[in-house]
Image (tube, rainbow, N blue to C red):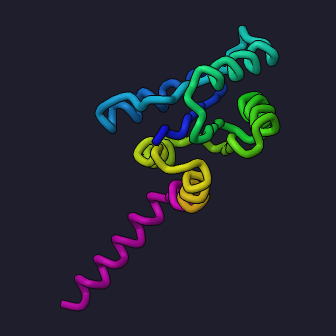
Amino acid sequence: MAKCAVILASHGFMAAEAVNSAGMILGDQPKNVDVVSVTPDKSYEECLDELHQKYEALDTTNGCLMFTDIYGGTPANIASYLSIEHPNDVVVFSGLNLPVLLEIFLDMNSDLKELEKKIEALIPTVCVNVSKKIKERMEEDADQMCSY
């Protein structure tokens, strides 16, 4: 089964570094993945052309998942064109983050619709108020200490 293609797009090099970080954590670089880095030296049209070229170069027989940094930003806007051109084969999410990216890379053999559902379920769980969690844990520990 072909792996779902993944394209990450971001302002600057965030997407490229997210792929590097994921590879460091997972032990190797994922396959069938590419990035588009929107930088000040590229026009909107150049970024759109680059995205089209990268899409055509990947194996998209099992669909293409795109992850961008900011909804409404240039990376998301160019990705939306690809989604319009390939409505059944491209799904675009904004809010690029490493926890969701790791899950995607670990489950790239799933079909596009399965990945889409998985990401929708993951998104509410990846932004955690760590300070609040620590305080809750400390309160739980204090309650347990008082019960001795």
Q: Is residue 91 visible?
A: yes
Residue at point 68% right, 41% down? 89
Can you say whether 40 is above or below 16 in the image?
above
**Location of the C terminus (image quadrant):** bottom left
In this rendering, position of residue 103 left or right of residue 95? left
Q: Is residue 14 visible?
A: no
Can you say whether 20 is above or below 122 in the image?
above
Q: Look at the image and say whether residue 127 sits in the magenta stretch.
A: yes
Depth check: 42 or 115 in front?
A: 115
Q: Quadrant of residue 144?
A: bottom left
Q: How many marks?
A: 0
Residue projecting furthest to the left = 148
Residue at point 54% right, 42% down? 97
Depth check: 24 or 12 in front?
A: 24
Residue 75 placement (x, y as % from top left): 71, 29
Q: Look at the image and say whether residue 133 sits in the magenta stretch.
A: yes
Residue at point 44% right, 48% down? 107
Residue 132 placement (x, y as % from top left): 47, 65
Residue 11 placement (x, y as % from top left): 66, 25
Residue projecting furthest to the bottom = 147
In this rendering, position of residue 103 left or right of residue 64? left
Residue 73 placement (x, y as % from top left): 76, 33
Residue at point 48% right, 39% down? 3
Q: Quadrant of residue 35?
A: top right
Depth check: 139 or 46 in front?
A: 46
Can you say whether 37 is above or below 91 in the image?
above
Can you say whether 138 is above or below 147 in the image?
above
Q: State whether the magenta stretch is mostly helix, strand or loop.
A: helix
Magenta stretch in the rendered image: 124-148
